Image (tube, grey):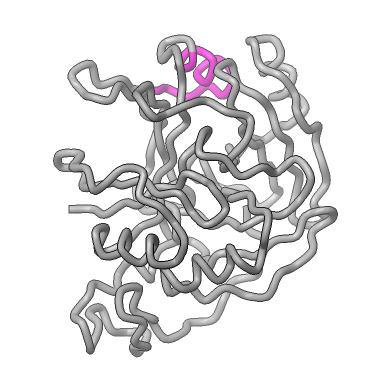
Amino acid sequence: MCFRPPSIVKPAKCPDCGTVNPPTKKICSKCQADLTITQINPINWFDIPVNDLLRAKTFYETVFSYSLTINETETPNRAYFPLTPAITGTSGSLVKADGYTPSETGCIVYLLVKDIPGTLAKIEANGGKILQSQTAMGELGFIAHFQDCEGNRVGLYTTTMAAKMNPVNWFEIPVNDLMKAKNFYKTVFSYSLPSSSKMGKLDMVWFPMKPKTPGTCGSLVKADGYIPAETGNVVYLSVNDIPGTLVKIEANGGKTLQPQTELGELGFIAHFQDCEGNRVGLYKHK
């Protein structure tokens, strides 16, 4: 979901030490950190928690015509959404594991569709529930919210600009105090976050967005019905240094929920609770 016009090329601010580097630099001149993650969008993975993996897999395949893949030997148990490398948007998985609890509150991931009313009809026919009917977002397109068969709040998004994209193209992190949350993410991740904007009844602060690049963008949102939670969907922010980021998180009012965990050749993840009470993930590739 592209809420902002394409941005101009800007200097690369190191996510580890905050040093401002020329836009063509790939390694930070001060701390030697990898600057390539500043050239992709913030979110590069999502998890939707489930209680019954096969039931949820069938729900998403039937409603969205996805082909989800399960790795029988993997722990935790996951069903992977399709992924096309090097295009806009991101992929993720359904997850059944301790600590992953379905919820109508918490972070919201938005699945790209062509026909929201038609998709909502299929959702209800397959055990889901409409939480917010199709809502116009001006020239930006339309959104809706539904509850899946596991009890998660998930979003739908459609736009006339839609091209070939990965399943998720927007995320929202609910907050109670927009300025406190903005300062938290700006301090911990060295993001350049703009002033808050009003979109209908939503007060939003957008994360940095890079059009036509892998990953996806999103926003902090304060509005009725948007409730921070440690349960529900998990969105993953790309970082260079997970242990170092967890230290900064705890120093700024957050909490480590899951320390760095290896996922084999896929890289490393961790979970934290932000200053608003949301469970959010960190991701580092190998």
Q: Main secondary structure of the magenta part?
A: helix
Q: Which picture quadrant has residue 99?
A: top left
Q: Is residue 16 above or below residue 261?
A: below
- Image side of residue 196 versus residue 88, left or right: right
Q: Verify whether residue 59 appears in magenta.
A: yes
Q: Which picture quadrant has residue 180?
A: bottom right
- Image side of residue 77 versus residue 213, left or right: left
Total numbered badges shown on the rendered structure: 0
Q: Please name whichever residue, 87 or 138, is drawn nearer the observer in this view of the structure.
A: 138
Q: Is residue 60 above or below residue 284?
A: above
Residue displayed at 80% across by 36% down: 134
Residue displayed at 42% across by 40% down: 91
Q: Verify whether residue 274 appears in magenta.
A: no
Q: Give how far across and how far down residue 213 sits, in percent.
A: 44, 61
- Image side of residue 9 versus residue 181, left or right: left
The stretch in magenta equals 56-68
Residue displayed at 48% across by 10% down: 55
Q: Give how far across and how far down residue 27 sits, in percent.
A: 22, 80
Q: Is residue 192 above or below residue 116?
A: below
Residue displayed at 52% across by 57% down: 275
Q: Please name whichever residue, 174 or 74, is drawn nearer the observer in this view of the structure.
A: 174
Q: Give how far across and how far down residue 155 sits, in percent.
A: 64, 37
